[in-house]
Every structure is written in structure tokens, then in C-alpha cells.
Image (cartoon, rainbow, N blue to C red):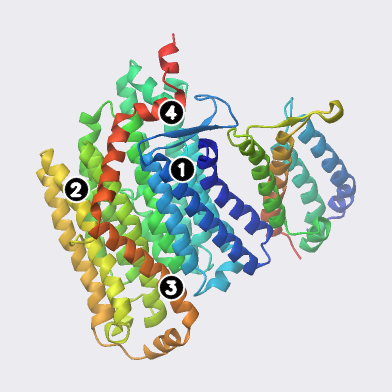
Amino acid sequence: MMNAHLLLTLPIAFPLAGVALCAMLWAKPGAQRIVSLIASFGLLLSSIALLAAVHDGTVLATQFGAWPAPFGISFVADMFSAAMVLITGLMAVAVGVYGLVGDAKAREQAFYHPLYQGLLLGVTGAFLTGDIFNLYVWFEVMLISSFGLLVLGGTRAQLDAGIKYVTLNLVATTLFLMAVAFTYGMTGTLNMADLSRVLPTLENQGLVTTVAILFLVAFGSKAAVFPLFFWLPAAYHTASAPVVAIFAALLTKVGVYAIIRSFTLLFDGDAGFTGPIIGAVAALTMVTGVLGAAAHFDIRRILSFHIISQIGYMLLGVAIATPLAIGGAILYVIHHIVVKANLFLIAGAIKAAGGSFELKEVGGLYRQLPFLSVLFLIPALSLAGLPPLSGFWSKFVVIKASLDAGHVVLAATGLVVGVLTLYSMLKIWNEAFWKAAPEGAEAALKSWRNDGATRVAMLVPIVTLAAITLTIGLFAEPFADYSMRAGEQLLEKSAYTDAVLGPRSLAEARP
Amino acid sequence: MNSLILRTTSRAVLPAALLFSVYVLLRGHNEPGGGFVGGLIAAAGIAVHALPRGRDALMALLRMSPKTIIGIGLVLGLAAGLPALLMAEPFLTHQWAFPGGVALSTTLVFDVGVYLAVVGSVLTFLSYYLEN
């Protein structure tokens, strides 16, 4: 049995070692590939070990440098964060393998592997940290790495997208930093477990709610919610397929994670006020995202807008904040990461086999590549929420939770948006797979047929992720059960705070 | 930027900056200073050397890419935290040894790692702006 210190350090140490060694080997792309893959597999294995240790409801905590909480920096894994780290490990490997082909050489020249590992490091750190300022640091690590990954190709469109992406994200990060400063000013602590005990004891609860809204705006920008999502559709469609797949899988979900964590652990005191705000934001996010997607014909743009729309469902769970709703939001995040990453990987395969991301320029893939077509349908129909796929169960739980709580409008919005999602997915299906191939599409198909290595490296991750989607759909019970228990654990709070601070809290000892 | 004044002064500035940066690095253990400030001082000294001479002179001085230096720094920072895990203590809990009365610790390894990461980062940025 490994101890808590090791279990919590390894998921951070593997990507950090990946960054360091890939930077040292910067002139040797071949060696970088091997290091990067080993680091990704290490992350996956260590996250499995972490999940195995916390799946029964235990909360693990360690204090880096052995400075006791709340003075040092705590790292904590509960059921929710361990699941998020595991899914990050899974994405790291799947997208890592996928990224070995295509324009891999050009990307590697531009420092792809260290940045990729840097992104994973930031994401994993954000999921595991128990300190709100440290969370800010991991956000920065993530932002810098993702900026580098976004402009890998160095084209005009990418630089344009990169500037918008960085500017809007820096505004959000600055708001985050201000909110952290206010929090410290009010409480004198930044340890999240300690904050969870100190915040309800403050006299000025109005100020606490104000700071909560400031955090909501900062995390909401990261999660791309209405009306703060502009950076996402401005940037995502310019990146290469593996980069946009890992972005779509992880970046916005770190924002969602931060919202769920802070509004269950820290700011649940004024739920009567914040709940309806989050609910309205959730509904508007769902609707604007899905309408934005309907207007576009570039696969990457369509899928980017659907990220926004799906974020709305996760926020719906946070807004309702019953155990069922939070559990549903967690199940939704897990399902969504797998499905969304897979859709972007398939978009890359459509580009490779059909020659373009633009729906008008591709076609006839169903006749030529029936296997890829079926692979597309699995995540596409899951995204729209058709039974028996994973999206059905996660939508079902979230919508049932909102009906139970009497939020009929929110539930209806969720259902209508599901139908509109189906419309977008069918649009991709009709254009890319069903309609006759346009002139000049044979060249790409021929090179796809002749390049076995590319096919294997692209299809193995796609098939794996599709199999996971099917597994969550057909054997939903253990996944739903885990999510529900993770949700209850989040609302319970005492397991988390006891693991970090010990049963006798410092808050009680304060004068 | 081939300035005679900069070129001449850099002969004195570079060794002084490097020496001073090591002093600040070691001083940082108990007094103000440390790897970050030390690294900045060293990078500033190297920048004064490289600005009038160009990118090739920078590479010749470093004998390796500044990106490699970042990597070495990060490896040292990570390595400094790992012995603690072997002792079943939290990551980055610093370990001490006193061979012959000299206090040696993994904190020093960590600080040297920070020093190298800072030098490497600043010089990586600088190298894109240097003339050839």
C-alpha cells in the first residue's frame, strides 16, 4: 500500500518530469516522444492508483514541504478530484498517441511535447490542490502552456486567435487574483479547507457573496459560460487536431471543476442568491452555445460551440445543488470529456481522410470508410443524449434533479438543447459522411489508405474513447453510483476539511 | 546592437554578475536572496555579454541551449523533492546531512534548480531578440 504523500505527488511529478526532460531534450524530437508518452502513461497509472485509494470515500491529503495546513500548501484528493485526475490521465495517453502522426514533425519543432506536458501539469495540479492561491498558480501554468500550444503553427490566424485567447484569459486570471486577495483580506487564510470553516463565521456575509460572484466570473470565463465565452470560439478552430482535442477535453473543465469545488466547499452560505444566478447562466450558456453551432460549417467551430452548450448542463447541476444534481454534474463532466475529445479526434481523422475541416469540402466518407462513420456516431449521438449512450444517463440525472427541485424551465431548456445538439451532429453526418464526395477529395483518401501508421495512431485512441463511451452507457450503474457518492462527499464537506486540518480545526481554536 | 561601450564594460560586468549571483544564491538560505534573484542577476550579466555580440556568442558562452538549462533546473527542482517521498514524508520536505559539520540539504538543490530555470527562461526569451 502506497502512502498518501506518494499517491498525491506522482500525478504531478510525472508531467513535471515530462516538461523537464522534454525541455532538456529539446533538439531530439524522437527522444521527446518517448519521454512524453512515458510521462502520460505514468500519469494514467498513478491516477488509477489514486482513484483506487479514494473510491471508498477516503479523502487523502498531504502538505508539501511538511508545513502544516493552513500555513503550507495542501494537496487533497477526494472522489471528485481523483476521478478528474484519472480522466486527465486517460486523455493524456489517448491524445498523446494521436499526436504522434499528422503534422507531428512540425509541431515537435515548435516545442510541442514540453508544452503538452506543461498543460497536463497545470490541469492535474489544479484538480489536486487544496489551496486557492495555488489553484491560481496552476491556472497560470495551464494558460502559458495552452498559449504555446495554440500558436504552434505560427500562422496569422493562430496568432490572431492566440492574442484574443491570452487577453481574455488574462482578464479572467486577474479577476481571480483579485478575488483571492479579497478572500485573504477577509479571512487571513487561503487554504480551502480552512476557508470552508472560517467563511461562515464572518460577520459581513454580504462581502462573502460579493467575492463569491467575483470567483464565479473568473472561473466562468475559464469554463466559457455565457456571456464570458468569447475567447473559446475565437481560438479553438485554429489549432491542430490533437491540440484542440486536449483543449476541448480539459481546459474548460478545469473552470467547471473550480466552480463546483468553490460553490460546494466555500460559498454555499448564500445559495438562495447565487443559485438562481448560476441557473440563469447555465440556461443561457446551453442555448447560445447550441445556436452558435447551428450557424457554422467548419467542424471545429461547430464542436467548439457545443463545448459551451454542454458546459451549461454541468452548471445546471451546480445551480440546483442537491446531492443528485451535483452527482449528475460530475457524471456529466466525466462523460463530456471523453465524448468531446473523441469528436475532435474524429474531426482530425475527417481532415486526414477527407482533406478538410470545412463541411462543404468533404463528403462521401460513409461509402468509403463505414467504420469511421460508426465511430463518429457513437460520441455524436452520446453528445446529443440518445439512449443507451453515456450522454443519455448524464442528461437524465441532471434533468431529473432539476425537475425534482421544481426547476421546470431549466429542465425544458436542457431537453430542447439536446434536440438542437442532435441537429448539429446530423449536419456533420449529412455533410461529411452522407452526401456525395466533392471534386478532388480522392487525393486525401488515397493518402489515408496508404498511410497505415497514421490510421493506427488515429483510430486506436478513437476506438478506445468510443468503447469508454459505450461502457459508461451500457454499464452506467457503477459510474452513476460513483458520481452520486462523490457528489454527497462534496456536500458533506467534513471528510475534506478533516483530512486537511485534522478533526480539531484551527477555526475553532481562533479567538 | 554593436556598441563599443557595452562590449567593453561587459568584460567586467559578466564575471562580476556571475560571482555575485552565486553569492546571492547561497546567501538566500538564511537571508534575503535565493535562486530566483540569483538567477536574474546571472541572466542580466549574460545578457550584457550577449547583447553586443549576438546569438552565436550567447550559445558559445552557454555551450548548450538555454532551453536545456530550463530542463536541468526543473529536473533539479523535482529531484530535490523526491528523497522525502522515500522517507515516507510529504513531497519537498527537505532532508539534511551534516558531513564534517557542514550543513548540506536538498533545499540547496532546489534553489540551484530555481536558479538554472530562471537563467534558462530569461535567456530563452532573450535569444529570440538577439541579432546574429
Can you give x and y, in whole percent of width and height, for residue A344 in the image?
Answer: 37, 66
Total marks in image? 4
For the residues tagged 2 and 1, is the chain the same?
Answer: yes
Q: In this orientation, does residue A315 appear?
A: no
Q: Are the two marked residues, 2 and 4, in contact with CB atoms closer than 8 angstroms? A: no
Name the residue tied to disc 4. Answer: A499
Real-space Cα distance between discs 2 and 3?
A: 32 Å
Q: Is residue A66 left or right of residue A324?
A: right
Can you give x and y, in whole percent of width and height, for residue A2 in the image?
Answer: 52, 40
- Label whose residue precedes the other's in the sequence (3 or 4): 3
The chain to which mark 3 is attached is A
Real-space Cα distance between discs 4 and 1?
A: 18 Å
Q: Are the two marked residues, 1 and 3, in contact with CB atoms closer than 8 angstroms? A: no
Extreme-front residue of the structure: A1
Residue toward you, A318 or A459: A459
Which label was assigned to residue A397?
Answer: 2
Q: Residue at x 23, y 52 (%)?
A: A394
Real-space Cα distance between discs 1 and 3?
A: 29 Å
Name the residue tied to disc 3. Answer: A458
